[in-house]
Structure formats: C-alpha cells, structure tokens
Amino acid sequence: MSKAPPEIISLYTQDSSALTLKWLGKPLKPKEDYRLVRGRGTFVDDIQLPRMAYMAFLRSPYSHARIKRIDVSRAKSMPGVLLVWTGDDIKRRMRPLPQATPPPARNAIDYPLAVDKVRFQGEPVAMVVAESRYIAEDAVNQIDVDYEPLPAVVDAERALEPGAPLVHEEVGTNLIAHVHYKWGDVDYYFQHADLVVEAKFHYHRFTGAPLETNAVVADYDERADVMTIYCNNQAPMEWLPQLSAGLNMPYPKLRVVTRDIGGGFGTKLINYVYMILAALASKELKRPVKYMETRTENLQAAAHNAERTCTVSAAVRKDGTVLALRMRCVDDDGAYSRHEPAGMTVWAQVSTGMYKIRALENDYYAVFTNKCPSTSIRGFSRAPHLFMIERIMDRIARRLGMDPAEIRMKNLVGPEEMPYMTPSGGIYDSGNWPEGLRRALEAADYWGWRKRQEELRRQGRIIGVGVVVGSDSAGPNMAQVKMYNPGLPYTGGTEGALVQMTPDGKVRVILGSSPQGMGHETTAAQVVADVLDVSYDDIYVQTGFDSFSSVYTMHSGTYGSRFAPIGLSAVYLAAARLKEKLAKIAAYLLKCPEGDVVIENGAARCAKDPQRSMELRRIARIAYGNVNELPPGMEPGLYSLAIFRPPFQNPDENRRANLALTYSYNVHVVVVEIDPETGMPKILSYTALEDSGRIVNPLIVDGQVHGAIAHGVAEALYEKYHYDENGNLLNPTFVDYLVPTALEIPDMKVIHMETPSPFTPTGAKGMGEGGGTAVQAVISAVEDALAPLGGELGESHADPETILRILKGAARGKSEV
Amino acid sequence: MSQELRHIRVKVNGQWYEADVEPRMLLVDLLRDVLGFTGVHIGCDTGHCGACTVIMDGRSVKSCMVLAVQADGSEIMTVEGLEKDGQLHPLQEAFWENHALQCGYCTPGQLMSAYFLLSRNPNPSEEEIRKAIEGNLCRCTGYVNIVKAIKAAALKMSSSKAG
C-alpha cells in the first residue's frame, strides 16, 4: 500500500539510548555450548527422581474408529504395573481441554486419551504407568481393544463436502473456522488488469522432528500440594488454562519447569496433553512419573504442520506490476484444534509478500480430518502464505516472458516507503529489499548462472535457478486469533525479564522464554553487558523457565521468532532501569549531579571529575548490605523487572491490524541440477542474504540461517508425510520419513545486510524460522529446471517420482512430435 | 517379560563398572539409567539418529543397537570421557568456537563419530567428514558448523602433534 502514517511510526518507535554498542554484534562463544559440548545439558529424560515411575501409551492403529471395549485386566495384573487408565478414567478426572475455536467447532470434545472414539492413527487410547519403562511397554501390549472402524476423511476439500464422515459428531461439520476478508478494492483491480494469472498449489504435510522427542516428568508433592512439571514445552505459560483445567489446580500450585530442550521447531507446543496425563498419574500414585515419547510416536502422532491448498489469482499489468491477489484456501488441521486454526490468520498480512500489492482477498477455511493434529512448525503461517505469492510470481514471470528476478525487483517495496503498511494493516518496520535482492543476485552470480544454464541446457542437462524474496515476520500479536474467533481473550505479545545485580557485583538474569537451542543465555547476556557495560563473563543467565521464579506473561515462551524483538526488549528495559538506579546511587555517593554520572567498564564515574568513581560491585554491596549509605528513602536491592509490551492493537472493524513487531527479510538464490535417470535434484549452489536488523551475535544468527535452510531443503526435497485413503500414515519412522544427513544438505553461502529495526530498543529483529524461503527457493529452482519441458509443480514438495513423471511426459511429447 | 538377570562388567571412560541387567536391556539404557552417563542421548528407535553414539572397543557404535550384555567386558567411551583433567578435547573446543551446535542434543553423538573419524583419519577431506557423520542427524545446524568444527579440530590436533 504505502508508507505507514507518522503517528503509527512514532507509536512503535523505541528508545535505545541505554545501548553502548560495545557488546552487541560480537561473535562471543555461546554460554550454553560449554555444558552441551561436555554432554552436561539437562534434558527432561536426564531427570531422575527417587521412586520415579514410567508412562507408556497404547495408541490407535485406526485413523477413525469407535472404541467398543477395552480390556485392561491382563495389563493391570502384571508385576510392576502401577496404573492402567483409559479415556473413561481420564474423563472422570478432568474437564475436556478448552477449545479456542469459534462455534460450532468449539463443541468438539478433546481429552488427552481417546474417549469413545479415535480420530487419528496414533491417538493414545490407554496408558500404563509402571516401575520401569520396559514393564510399562510390556503391559501396553497386553491391553485388548475392540474397534469398529469408521470411514475416514483424509482430504481437506472433501471434508467440506456434504455427507463426508464427521471427525466430531458433536460439531455437526468438519469446518473449524472460516474467514473472508477483502482489503482494498480487489474487484476493481481484477476488472482493470491486463491479465489474470491463476494457479492451485498445495503446501504439504511435514514436521519439525526435533532430535529430542516430547518428554515430561511430573512430580506431585503431597505435603505442599504442589505439582512440578519438568517438560520441554516451548511456551508453557500459554497453556496454563489447559493445565489448570486438566489438573483442577490454581496457577500458584503449578510449577512448570524447562531446562535444556533438544530442539522444538514448533512441535513442542501441544505436548501439554502428555503433561496433563503424567501429572494426573503422579497425583494418583503420589510418585514422580516420567514419559519419554518414542520417535515413532513423535513422528506419527505428536504434531504436524497444517496442510494448505490454495487457489491463487493475481491481477497483473502487462509490464509485470502485480495489482491485487485473491486466495481461496483450505487448511487441513487434523483431528483436534490444539493449536490451529491459528495459522490461517496469523500473519495473514504477509500474503502479499514483500510486494506493493494494492489489494488482497483472503477466503480461508480450516477443517478437521482424521490425521495428526497440527501446530506451528518452523516458518509457521508465513511459510505457506509466502509460498503462494512466490509461486504465483514465478508463474506470472513465465507468462510475461520476464525473468523471475526482474518481476520481483519491479514489485518490491522500496526503502523510501519504510515503514510500509500492507493492505491488511501490517507494518513492515525497516529494510531495503531491492538492495537485498541486488546483493544476493550478485553474490550468487545469478546472471552468470542464467548464461551457464542456457549453455548446459543445450548439452541436455536439466538446470534450474530459483530466486525468492521472503519475510520472517516475528514477535506475534496474538490478537490475530480474534480474526477467526472475536471472543478470545488473548491479545498482544509480551515477555518478561528480571535483571539483578547481586551483592558481589555480578549479574543474574532470568528470562520468561523457554529456548530450544536459540542461544538466549548468550544474547540476553550480551544485551545486559551492552547496557550496563560490564563483562559478558560476569553475567549469569538462568537456564530455561521456571514458573516459580521466572517473570512471565501468558505469551511467555519461545515461538514465533519472538525472543529478539520482544524477549530481548524486556531484557533491555530491565537492564536500562537497573542502570538508572545504579546512576542514582552513584550520584549520591560520588556527590555528582545525576546527569553527569557515566557507567562504564564496571564502574560509575562523574563525567566532570573522573577521579570521582566507584566500582559497581561497591554500589551493589551498599545496595544490599550497607544500606544506611543509600540515598534517603531509596529502596534497597538491585532488582529490575520488566515486561515489554509492543503497542499492538486489536484488528479494527475491517480486520486490519499489525500482527508482528518486526519483519526480517531474506533472499535465497538456488541452483539445482536434476538427474534425468533418478529425477533427483542436486543443489549446485545455495546463497542466502539475511537482514534481521541489528545482529546481536553473528554466530547465532548464521546458525539459525543454516538451520532454516536445512529445514526448507528437507521439506522441499525429502520430508513429506504420506497418508493413504484410510488415514494410515505410511512413513512414521526415520526409516521412511527422510530427515536429511550431512550428505544431503548442501554447503551454503550466507551474506548479511543489517538494517536495525526502529521498533525494538536493540534494533534486533526476530529471525531463525526463515519464513519458508528455502522451501520456495528450492521449488522455484526445480520448476525453473522443468519449465522448458512443460513441467510445473503444484506442491511445496518435489519428490523424484513427480519429477520423473514430468520428464517422462516431456520425452513422450517429443516422440509423438 | 523380565528374564533372569545377567551379571556384566564394562569399563566406561576408564573405570570398571558391574551391573546385573536383563538380557534385553539396551546398552544406551545401561549407560544412561544405570551408570548415569546422561550425555548419551536417545533420539530415535530405529538406529538412524546417532545421538547415542559411543566408542566401544575402539569403534563407534550406536548404543541403542547394542545389548548391554553384548558389551560385557568391553571398553566404552562416552562424551563424558572426552575431557582430560578439566581440559576440553580439541573437538569440544572446536564445536564451541564454531557454534557447531544449537540445542546440543545430537552433539555428544556428533562428537563421538568425529572422534572415531579422527582416530582413523587425522586429515579428512570435507567429503570424508560428511560421510563420517552421515549416521548422526542434526536438526538445528544444517551440519555447516559441525563440518567446519571437525575440520578445525583436525587441523589443530595434527599441528599440535607435529609441533
């Protein structure tokens, strides 16, 4: 649309005056890595408590079936078995899980163990708790269940057809939610376009597959009536209502703890179902209960991404200007709404990508199917949104005979329009996308590759070049859920932090986040070091989250690339407030006007008289112990707590709102060659430009870029779930769900631009999910390779079979001529 | 079903341990749950992920693919055995320097596979490194910094030997 109005810009702009820029941007060795290279992390499965018992599940072999009878008698009588529960036992002990969906979908009844009916393959049907994991698994095999199989619904579009099997009878339809917005005069642009380009695309089903599966240890302390849950949930406080309802305990009695987490990628948001079951069992047995999911359970039944099928239409001028977009999409959210349909509206504003598109129509449906429930896998929501626009840009370019890089350059928002407001009210904070595209093309030798591509094609080789511009929108405004359910009392996006200078002058930091390898201990320490100008080595950041000591809100956690824009902003604010207090005390002690106090190199000094100075640790000692020396009336101690609140607002009557605080962007250029015999693409060159605002630690930023590329390449070429028509998942193990090894992931060149965000005090933007750019870039390259043969890819996954079909089709076409 | 326990002896990181184990117990469970070497991680149930890689009698093995009774009398080295006198092994140093990890869950397995590689081939090429860690999945790093770190460690170890 256009540059954001000045009053919005000033509302969002943050003060960053406490930064010294001495510690930000340095490749400091990550604090977490020291324990992890020694194998001394504490993951949930490493926790051993006295009298601990072990939980295991019997899972449904059917995707949709009525449970006629469960016989647990043999399992119960086995030595070492402590407890066997079915859905009925759970139903007696807890209310159903709260639903965030609008009516009638909210009538769905969701229990962590199936009640009466199973709705996806792998759904837990019964649980055993036993003296050892071996015994628990033995006992699971002794449970007999009579099922009456029901017809399954596995295709999202068919799920909406009349007469389709119902996943939840009490809902009366498979529709979870429907949203339809028009932003700008879409009809006008479609009437006045030179051409309309339309295509249908499918964003496929995969998962994050963190190397550590879901795990929990629940430990009920009967004396204190406190339930401690050690877990690897990415956002435990987001699920407080679910836990509290499930356990019927008030929040102050629920202690939720995370320590080291072995990757998450969005899959560890909805593991609260395990947390509740382990906790209920612990309360029953008055013993700690551990559960460690197996890999097969994880891949089959933990959390997939929502599939999306879209028909995308673009109104285009002959010169390549894209005027408006129409999207009609159906999301396949699986059997329960445990996190979705959020992805339908979350970051809907990036539907127009990085382009000056004037109007947008979104018509989205989310449906239940008999598949694994879905959640926010890395790149969540923006990846499928951006996939659609990037794929249609390639199709438009081909129709107009333009180069894919040229059509992007023509439509990109320019730096003079920043901060830029999208048709749906999103505010892209900063950046220079055309310059980013230019630099990426140059670094990748794009035009050189185009020439070589022609030469190599003449030699019969199948070479493709893909170029994609993407966004890693970050730091979500939860009010986006109001777009599908206006009644939800969940808005904004906040995070807390505590920065304390201890009496010895060292600094202790406690975060509200629960990271899974993103280096929060490192970057938080760098921000604190930068603001207070004390040594990085003197800063101690607590590992993980603990609801009994961390400063939290109900947004707290690590998802949505939110730590850099929101978490670090809270750290900055807490450190800046501590610095103010230190300056006040120093002014009094040094008899120096407050405005003249400089805090530097671990000391406070008076600018006018550098002789008058004092080490911070002396001030700290005074603040806690020698308090009669403090300024009269000043509260002792050096605790500083902050909760950062971006100035987010709810969607207006036209459902316009800014849904993220920062918008990192990236440009990926990929060259692939396809093996004509096997149909397998090989990546010949991979270049990524990343601008995530001010870089706090380049080691961590580069690591995140590498990881996002690896996931994207995997999704595009290797990882795809295959369900058959009966809802059987055909590849639920690492044998057939193809996680790439070091031999498949290509070497990659990463370059940077660094445009600080005006909307965060540190200037850093959220990054790391990559916005699915790698998926789009690889698919773009593969399609570019196949285009001269008349092949187009309708999906975000290009497997050799599909490619071979296109190659064979082309060969047949030729022989016919 | 539980069977008669077997008495076994294993030497882990230089020290002998004895235990009575069920014949079906996996070596990884012995190491983690009985002997407390929790640096050995479990990431899958099919032997694909490599998080549980240890050195057994000089060879790298996936300890979830070995029964504890098969290890009777064996000498095993886990990630906890890499450090000497409080000094990190050059591989651990290089992993830290190069940020060759994020969540750290696959790291012990990567380190042990790299250790085995360098014990056989002190100057591996990039391709040889990638081949050597093929059995160790990493979901965080895209392997970029792992490969870099192993190269750096190889260089450091061979130059310190030469010096």
Image (tube, rainbow, N blue to C red):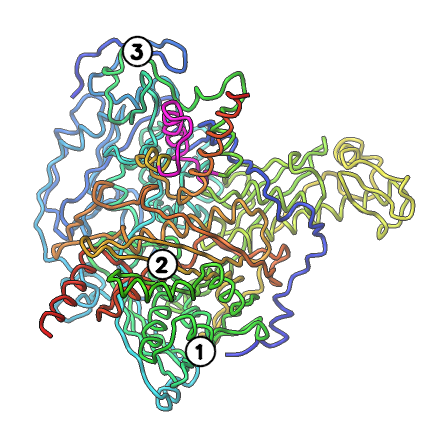
Mark 3 — residue?
B19
Q: Nearer the viewer, mark 2 or mark 3?
A: 2
Question: Residue at 10% across / 58% down in the picture?
Answer: A151
Q: Say if labels 2 and 3 share a chain.
A: no
- Left or right of A145 in this view: A308: right
Q: Are dots 3 and 1 in contact, CB under 8 Å?
A: no
Q: Splitting the image into 4 quarters, where does residue A582 fall?
A: top right
**Quarter of the figure that contains the C terminus of chain A:** bottom left
Marks 2 and 3, how far apart in space?
55 Å
Residue A602 spot, x, y in % from top left: 75, 38
Q: Chain of mark 2?
A: A
Q: Are dots 1 and 2 in contact, CB under 8 Å?
A: no
For mark 3, does the 10 Å Cα neighbourhood hold few (<14), some (14 to 19), or many (20 or more) residues? some
Residue A591 colored in magenta in the image:
no
Mark 2 — residue?
A671
Q: Nearer the viewer, mark 3 or mark 1?
A: 1
Q: Which mark is residue A357?
A: 1
Regarding mark 2 in the picture, which secondary structure is present there? strand
Regarding mark 1 in the picture, which secondary structure is present there? loop
Q: Chain of mark 1?
A: A
- Left or right of A51 in this view: A631: right
Front residue of A440 and A574: A440
